[in-house]
Image (cartoon, rainbow, N blue to C red):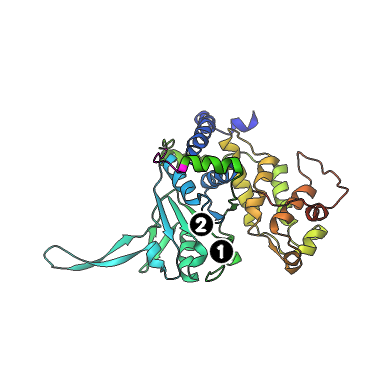
Amino acid sequence: MEEEKSLAENEVAAIERLKNTYEKMRTELSKRIVGQETVLDQLIIALFAGGHCLLMGVPGLAKTLMVRSIAEIMNLSYNRVQFTPDLMPSDITGTEVLTEERGGKSRFFKFLPGPIFANIVLADEINRTPPKTQAALMEAMEERQVTVGGKRYKLDHPFFVLATQNPIEQEGTYPLPAAQLDRFMFMVYVDYPDKKEEYEILRLTTTRYIAKLEPLLTKEEIISLMNLVLKVRVPDEVNRYAVALARLTRPKELDAPEFVKEYVAWGVGPRAPQALILGSKARAMLNGRYEITAEDVRSLVHPVFRHRLITNFHADAEGISSDHIIAQLINTTPAPDKPIQQKKRSFFARLFSGGNGKQN
């Protein structure tokens, strides 16, 4: 196969081993996490693609447990930061403290690292802290470093931030501006479990038994695999498909569909197709493939686009969300592997008659 020729034998073997490891990861996580397979898949994809995630969900849906469990099976260091209105940047990044040598001959400033110095950082309720503190986290996410006392300190690699927001409570919050939302590779929705899953959650969590998870990878292996993601092949037609999906979200684009012009204020920027392709590469590799497909791209459009696509007041008034727009966009955009089927009824007619445009 052409795509295999571009990879060394040991790299091909590493991808094949990763597929088996990925299945084991799912099995291990299922010992603690009931359901939420799509959420867990998207978090793992983002990690291998080198991105960050924003999790949206009401309290009590095991978001913290998910992140901690992923850190355990990947053998990575983990810290959790509870964001509050009085949280200062130094509470995250660390601070310099005056230290005295033995004997009291001299004093000097010593840097004490904050909780940001971990491989996986859970930023809990990120919208509850002021913009100044949010900005300190954004610098760490973008630059992989923090600045304290005019000095720069490199963060550990890999570095993965998973931030959470509660979509219900908005009082006393500081919403993230669009430019900061764009720093997150995915926005992932965590929904309520179904009846069967909720029964299983009750059975697992009301005993003294806590499942132990087996570490399946080392930090060095993860870094090597993250570098290997960049070598996964992307056919030209799939690149064009990702670009088309992004450009068609922009109301001023000549070929933008009417529903975009009617309901969208701002479309996604160039980071969106970049995230689509990188995420698709990681998804393909986790499934043992050396080349991405249009299906890889389609499966990630919702988490990549939903926080970057800004609906207008017409959409807000009619209850149309970015997920509804994205679902219609996928249905109407030609793809390399799927001809467009003409629909007798519009997407929004189906939506208002009982359909649901929301996707995980």
Residue 1 in the image: state x and y as whole percent. 64, 28
- Residue furthest to the left in view is 103
Looking at the image, which residue is at 73% across and 62% down?
319
Residue 264 in the image: state x and y as whole percent. 74, 63
In the rendered view, would you say 171 is above or below 13?
A: below
Relative depth, front residue between 51 and 168: 168
Residue 271 in the image: state x and y as whole percent. 62, 56
What amino acid type is highlighted by mark number 2? Answer: Ala
Looking at the image, which residue is at 57% across and 37% down?
285
Residue 1's disc number: none
In the rendered view, would you say 73 is above or below 247?
A: above
Tell me the distance, in whole angstroms, between the alpha carbons under discs 2 and 1. Answer: 12 Å
What amino acid type is highlighted by mark number 1? Answer: Gln
Task: Name which of mark 2 and mark 1 comes first in the sequence.
Answer: 2
Q: Label 1, secondary structure: give it.
A: helix
Q: Is residue 247 left or right of residue 346?
A: left
Would residue 208 be counted in the magenta stretch? yes
Looking at the image, which residue is at 45% across and 68% down?
133
- Residue 106 showing in the rendered view: yes
Residue 208, quarter of picture? top left
- Residue 135 showing in the rendered view: no
Residue 85 in the image: state x and y as whole percent. 45, 70
Q: Label 2, secondary structure: give it.
A: strand
Which residue matches tag 2? 163
Which residue matches tag 1? 180
- Residue furthest to the right in view is 344
Q: Overall secondary structure of the magenta stretch?
A: loop
Residue 291, quarter of picture? top right
Q: Which residues are magenta?
A: 205-211
- Number of the front mark, 2 or 1: 2
Relative depth, front residue between 107 and 73: 73
